[in-house]
Image (spheres, rainbow, N blue to C red):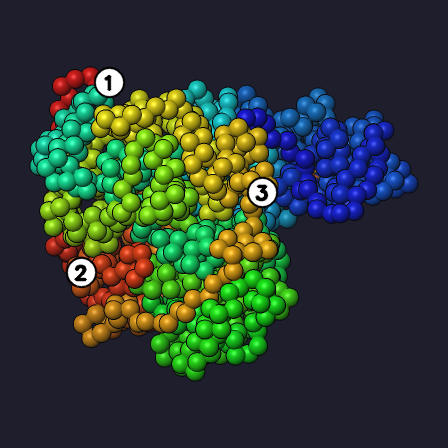
Amino acid sequence: MNTTEIDHGTPARDSATRVTLTIDGQSVTVPAGTSLMRAASEAGITIPKLCATDSLEPFGSCRLCLCEIDGRRGYPSSCTTPAEAGMNVRTQSPKLAQIRRGVMELYISDHPLDCLTCAANGDCELQTQAGVVGLRHVRYGWDGANHLAAAKDESNPYFTYDASKCIVCNRCVRACEETQGTFALTISGRGFGSRVSAGMDEPFLESECVSCGACVAACPTATLQEKTVIEMGLPEHSVVTTCAYCGVGCGFKAEMQGNRVVRMTPWKDGRANEGHACVKGRFAWGYATHKDRVTKPMIRAKITDPWREVSWDEAIAYAASEFRRLQAEHGRGAVGGITSSRCTNEEAYLVQKLVRAAFGNNNVDTCARVCHSPTGYGLGQTFGTSAGTQTFKSVAHADVVLVIGANPSDAHPVFASRMKRRLRQGAKLIVIDPRRIDLVASPHVKAEYHLQLRPGTNVAVLDALAHVIVTEGLVDEAFVAERCDPRSFGQWRDFVARPDNSPEALEAVSGVPAAAVRGAARLYATRGLNAAIYYGLGVTEHAQGSTAVMAIANLAMATGNVGREGVGVNPLRGQNNVQGSCDMGSFPHELPGYRHISDSTVRAEFDAAWGVTLDPEPGLRIPNMFDAALGGSFKGLYVQGEDIVQSDPNTQHVNAALEALECLVVQDIFLNETAKFAHVFLPGSSFLEKDGTFTNAERRISRVRRVMPPLAGLADWEVTVRLSNALGYPMDYAHPEAVMAEIAALTPSFAGVSYEKIERLGSVQWPCHAGTEEAGTSVMHVGGFVRGKGRFVITAYQPSDERANRRFPLLLTTGRVLSQYNVGAQTRRTANTAWHEEDRLELHPADAEERGVVDGDWVGITSRAGETVLRARVSERVAPGVVYTTFHFPESGANVITTDSSDWATNCPEYKVTAVQVNKVSQPSRWQQDYQRFNEAQLRALAERESPVAAK
Ligand code: SF4
Ligand code: SF4
Ligand code: SF4
Ligand code: FES
């Protein structure tokens, strides 16, 4: 894949009107509004520039890009002058050359001439342009007033700001505003004294900068420079790949020196991110070569035994013989597997295939069980398929954006930047969240409505919104009549119109003023406006998670907000490949492409292709596996790239279940919390070490490309293939491309997916079968729902069992923070800890005062399930009665207190509502003390592992 990126200087314009002009004697036709600079560049004519770059609106400050236009006086800057029909433009002339040299001379006279030792030597636009304009002399000398001794700001762990090299081009300031939307930078001072400053002239780390790197990418000099480039030098080649953190699925160029990553730069042609990134994908990749990586297979008979390093062959043979022994002794269903939402599609496919074909049962599940399984159920019931309806880009067409139970600026930051851009352009925002997330009020963005509901009352609020829409005549009758099932609509309309679903009746339940609900409903349902819903785990991780997803789908259908740009229902999927792992048949009841295992026609296709007879009965879900393990009927588990001990609820229960297993095989890059209970450890490979594909929240399938050899010698997919062969079920693939070919052959919605096509088009969106565009489907349900007629479902509100009472008077809800990622296994091993080094408990000042707690105190949090201790953060972000924490650090034990209350339809745990009491304490909880002892013993077992052979 060609990784060369051309900078056309100013952004492309989208206009049906085209204008033809002449540049340097060449006839050029471009969309109206295109700058002269871009028009020239697209025709292969390069105009010198410094302050312009095509990711940002033109600014016109450097005066290097001047041109001559017939009939115009002076020398207009080509970056700020739009092309007009009939213009005759010259970009080169002796006069222009003279002016440009003069401009450049001024820049260089205040610039340190340390090019040979500068980190950007060879990658500096100032250096390049000095050469382009032919600067040979600097007449002013360097002894006048200058900035050469300006101090460096090295506070950010990933980049430096060396003010002595700044040419005050403003690109960084504009990048922070336009691309990222944080507005952290300003140019302080005037004229000669002007300089870039972060926040209120603070060090970057202490300012509101979120370290997205947009300013670093935009800086034409070494003023803002990645520290890895300063340390290692410039990369010599690059490979395009996909971020392995969140479901946005940003495209990156891994810029390399040999097998070593020098930096990750966001890929301009990445469809999901278009050249933007967040701190995780951009900078937090050092975990991939962290010293904690375990790169040799290990086995042990009991978890109290020391580990023994063995060869791949021995580890795999041992695991296979144990699984076969357990099946012989306890039955075919005594073993199962868990696929990973961090691994590739091909890897998830192979693990579920191994379970179904080699184990001979359907005991396969995935971590989507604990996040978006209600999305699968809810959207399947209403629309007919389990996926977001839009592309991220579609938000640019939304007039109203409703965000419920999601915190995009922390969890899906690059999409949040896109959304904020649209909001700054005037789209209206409704936020439904128990917590005052950043989006409610951030620079130049303010929600019209923040419905700060009590945790656990989403369905009540969604029903109240529907009540207003139905009773105030806001239904899009034409859409409903044409596109939806009339019977289910009638039943739903009668249900939501009942007085007990009115905002007034439900105010006491949700705590949201009825007037605000009415206002939000009217805004969302405004006729003629595009309204889009984005939701996250704050919707799904509830006892009524599936109900809430269906209530959201009902709202969109009733208002006609499905099936075109700017509208839709969009789950913001958490992990990089959680969409893909679900698509690949990771659920116990579904084969790839969401086809039920009980469907004999579908099963027959797989039977024929795989040469087996599939079990028609759905297998065990993860919680059922734990229960069966404790009950003695489930004995062996193969877990690929998933830390169930830290991520699943009710940690004590999970630990007890894993302790009951006779063979736990964990495949991971680190000895994670789950691996501490394992009998076989198979070293995993990071996304940098393998080929494959990830599918993001837009259903977009993008390539993951190997940029370095696997540290352990094998990529994850190769390990699964070997394990299957050792189990006696042959698998033979030369490359993940062959796995994708098999997926495409067996899965109608993937029929048109191939590596060749992804290579050619950059990415493909499923459904991608006969009748769709070559690149697949960008907007779903255009003209008709996947299931035919859209189906309304009655969504009666049921209070959660997790209600506050005298013993547990507060409601705990959980979430993520920008700099850390889920269980933190990766981000905790990077400098991202500079922003977040521990999980804290947020509580409202009134609740804090009642308990005598001040900011920073240790507080015990007790629920029905257990107790843990964290430090307090007193904050008005949460309402009285609500407390909040993140869950990125194992020692916090956030899941020690979450209960096994779960979604009625899918068993997705109710992480977002736990009734708790909070008290000031002085020591860790009993669980934390036990954890510390266990953890130390396990780390000792790792450190003292026997290494009898040079493992191969
Ligand atoms: S890193 Fe991002 S947030 Fe920070 S100053 Fe640069 S553009 Fe702004
Ligand atoms: S820091 Fe870089 S991008 Fe910002 S004004 Fe200075 S030279 Fe331009
Ligand atoms: S937004 Fe998500 S996919 Fe993009 S760089 Fe950040 S973590 Fe990676
Ligand atoms: S590039 Fe046009 S004025 Fe700077």
Q: As rendered, which of 172 and 843 lies closer to the eye? A: 843
Crowding near the residue tagged with mark 2, few <14, some 14–19, many ≥20 C-alpha atoms within 10 Å: some
Q: Percent x, y for residue 736?
A: 41, 28
Indicate the amino acid at tag 1.
Lys
The residue tagged with tag 2: helix, strand or loop?
A: loop
**Would you identify the image quadrant in which residue 724 lies?**
top left
In this figure, which residue is indicated by the disc labeled 1? 952
Furthest-right residue in this view: 71
What residue is drawn where x is 21% and y is 21%? 313
The CA distance from mark 3 to mark 1 is 48 Å
Side (left or right) of 388 relative to 481: left
Crowding near the residue tagged with mark 1, few <14, some 14–19, many ≥20 C-alpha atoms within 10 Å: few
Indicate the amino acid at tag 3.
Gly
Q: Percent x, y for residue 168?
A: 62, 41
Taking the image in four quarters, ligand 4 sits in the one at top right
Q: Is residue 593 visible?
A: yes
Q: Percent x, y for residue 893?
A: 22, 52
Indicate the amino acid at tag 2.
Ala
Mark linked to residue 771: 3
Q: Which tag, 3 or 1, sits closer to the chain's start?
A: 3
3 and 2 marks in contact (CB < 8 Å): no
Side (left or right) of 674 relative to 476: left
What residue is drawn where x is 29% and y is 25%? 730
Q: As rendered, which of 792 and 674 lies closer to the eye? A: 792
Q: Percent x, y for residue 49?
A: 69, 34
Q: Which tag, 2 or 1, sits closer to the chain's start?
A: 2
- For marks 3 and 2, give the one nearer the viewer: 3
The CA distance from mark 2 to mark 1 is 44 Å
In the image, residue 185 above or below residue 762 = below
Q: Is residue 248 visible?
A: no
Mark linked to residue 865: 2
